[in-house]
Image: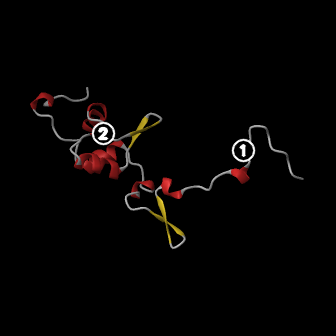
Amino acid sequence: MIHPRLPNEPDVTQLEPINHDDFGYNRVRGKLAKRPGSETMNERWVSVAEIAEHLGVSKDTVYTWIETKRMPAHRVGRLWKFQRAEVDDWVKSGGAASDGPANAGKGRR
């Protein structure tokens, strides 16, 4: 038995196909392939402790950079999570650069 559509339900025969380019994929020989630069899609999320170890800084420094230097971080409940590639790009672009003596000795307390 075919059920009638609800009043607010879209007619699926009228929907446009998904554009996989919007999700970091390209078509290669008729198959989907990851677009270069979209490696973070499958990258594991890491914790504050793991990103601090990766960068060689303390966890307090990571929290300070989140608050004052717009370090790329994502809140998941009470926890901060990071993508290493995003953080590496942020560091390479100068995001972790020191502002000089004005910030010397300041930290999270």
The answer to whether residue 103 is above or below residue 23 is above
The answer to whether 1 appears left or right of 94 in the picture is right
- Mark 1 is surrounded, within 10 Å at the Cα level, by few (under 14), some (14 to 19) or many (20 or more) other residues, namely few
Image coordinates for residue 71, horizontal then vertical, percent: 30, 39
Q: Is residue 54 left or right of residue 82?
A: left
| Rendered image: mark on residue 71 | 2
Pick whichever of labels 1 and 2 is earlier in the sequence: 1
Disc 1 to disc 2, C-alpha distance: 41 Å
Residue 56 x %, y %: 22, 47
Q: How is the image coloured?
A: secondary structure
The residue shown at (13%, 31%) is 104
Q: Residue at x 59, y 55 (%)?
A: 18
For the point 9% across and 31% down, the residue is: 101
Point out the residue furthest to the top here: 109
Q: Locate residue 104 relative to residue 76 in the image: left or right.
A: left
Residue sitting farthest toward the bottom: 29
**Relative to 96, is 13 above or below?**
below
Look at the picture and state if 25 lies above or below 57. below
Q: Amino acid at mark 1?
A: Pro
Q: What type is the residue that disc 2 sits on?
A: Met
Residue at the image point whose x is 38% and y is 62% from the top: 36
Nearer the observer, disc 1 or disc 2?
A: 1
Q: Which mark is residue 10?
A: 1
